[in-house]
Image (cartoon, helix red, strand yellow):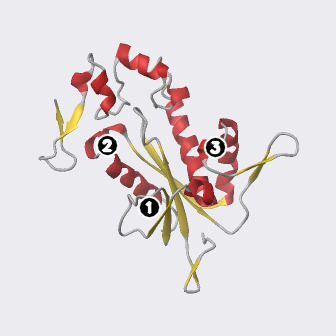
């Protein structure tokens, strides 16, 4: 599980980390940590002579993401998924929930990484992890791109599985994001057990506003009051 960079002549194990679900109204936030070896990343065959390169999951079709998700585990030296459920997001806030999900993924790797590459400007991991933040890392680093694809495919499957227990919310299509179908179901039926109840969307739903959870700034992190 060694990546291409070196530190003082010693190979450095690098983990690419990416998340999905941060802005959704329902479902968990999911983080994947991925580590590559030195081999070239997999490439998919497109139409005709065209090929599809590994990149940010948002730039790939659902079919291409699914195809990459099948081959990436065999190419990666290791990967792991971590998540924070809606209840945890409501309890501790998104930044801390995201950090916890990332730590769960990193700690589940077969070997701890020496360096973690995060997509974006902000280091939500902090110590003791050695972190390098890169804007659009999921388009510049194949390791982060792999994490992006695996996190997206994993979370989309989780949300699709909720269709039977939560019909009408369109989770298979929206993945918990505010699509018109999702918003209409919320207005008519209210939030499900899979919704984040501290999110501001409840302010716009008079029938269900009483369910909103508020973190009490005087009670300390993790304390909730139901107002």
Q: Could you tell me if residue 165 is visible in this image?
A: no
Of all residues shown, which one is farthest toward the bottom?
Answer: 8
Q: Quadrant of residue 187?
A: top left
Residue 140 in view, yes or no: yes
Sooner in the amino-acid sequence: mark 1 or mark 3: 3
Residue 161's place in the image compared with 118, above or below, is above
Q: Earlier in the sequence, mark 1 or mark 2?
A: 2
Residue at x 16%, y 42% (from the top left corner): 216
Distance, label 1 to label 2, CA atoms, is 19 Å
| Location of residue 215 (image quadrant) | top left
Q: Residues within 10 Å of mark 3 (few under 14, many from 20)?
A: few
Residue appearing at x 58%, y 48% in the figure: 150
In the image, which disc is placed on residue 107? Answer: 1
Name the element at disc 2. Answer: helix
Left or right: where 85 falls relative to 52? left
Q: Could you tell me residue 130's position as x and y percent?
A: 43, 70
Q: Which residue is mark 3?
A: 59
Which comes before the other along the chain, label 3 or label 2? Answer: 3
Outermost residue on the right side: it is 48
User: In the structure shown, which secondary structural element does the residue marked by tag 3 occupy?
Assistant: helix
Left/right of residue 218 with respect to residue 48 in the rendered view? left
Question: Does the residue at mark 3 contact the one at mark 2 (Cβ under 8 Å)?
Answer: no
Q: Where is 136 relative to 176, above or below?
A: below
Q: CA distance from mark 1 to mark 3?
A: 28 Å
Nearest to the eye among marks 1 and 3: give it: 3
Q: Quadrant of the N terminus?
A: bottom right
Say which mark, if any, is on residue 88. 2
For the point 34% across and 34% down, which residue is it?
Answer: 196
């Amino acid at each position: 599980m060694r990546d291409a960079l070196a530190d003082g002549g010693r190979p450095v194990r690098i983990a690419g980390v990416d998340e999905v679900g941060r802005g959704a109204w329902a479902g968990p936030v999911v983080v994947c940590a991925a580590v590559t070896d030195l081999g070239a990343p997999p490439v998919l065959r497109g139409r005709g002579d065209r090929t599809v390169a590994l990149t940010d999951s948002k730039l790939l079709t659902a079919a291409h993401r699914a195809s990459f998700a099948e081959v990436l585990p065999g190419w990666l030296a290791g990967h792991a998924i971590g998540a924070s459920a809606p209840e945890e997001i409501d309890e501790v806030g998104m930044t801390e929930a995201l950090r916890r999900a990332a730590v769960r993924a990193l700690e589940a790797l077969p070997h701890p990484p020496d360096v973690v590459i995060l997509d974006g400007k902000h280091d939500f991991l902090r110590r003791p992890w050695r972190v390098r933040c890169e804007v659009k890392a999921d388009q510049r680093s194949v390791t982060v791109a792999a994490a992006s694809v695996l996190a997206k495919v994993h979370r989309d499957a989780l949300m699709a599985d909720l269709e039977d227990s939560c019909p009408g919310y369109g989770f298979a299509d929206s993945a918990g994001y505010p699509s018109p179908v999702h918003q209409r179901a919320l207005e008519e039926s209210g939030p499900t057990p899979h919704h984040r109840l501290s999110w501001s969307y409840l302010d716009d739903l008079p029938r269900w506003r009483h369910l909103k959870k508020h973190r009490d700034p005087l009670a300390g992190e993790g304390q909730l009051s139901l107002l």
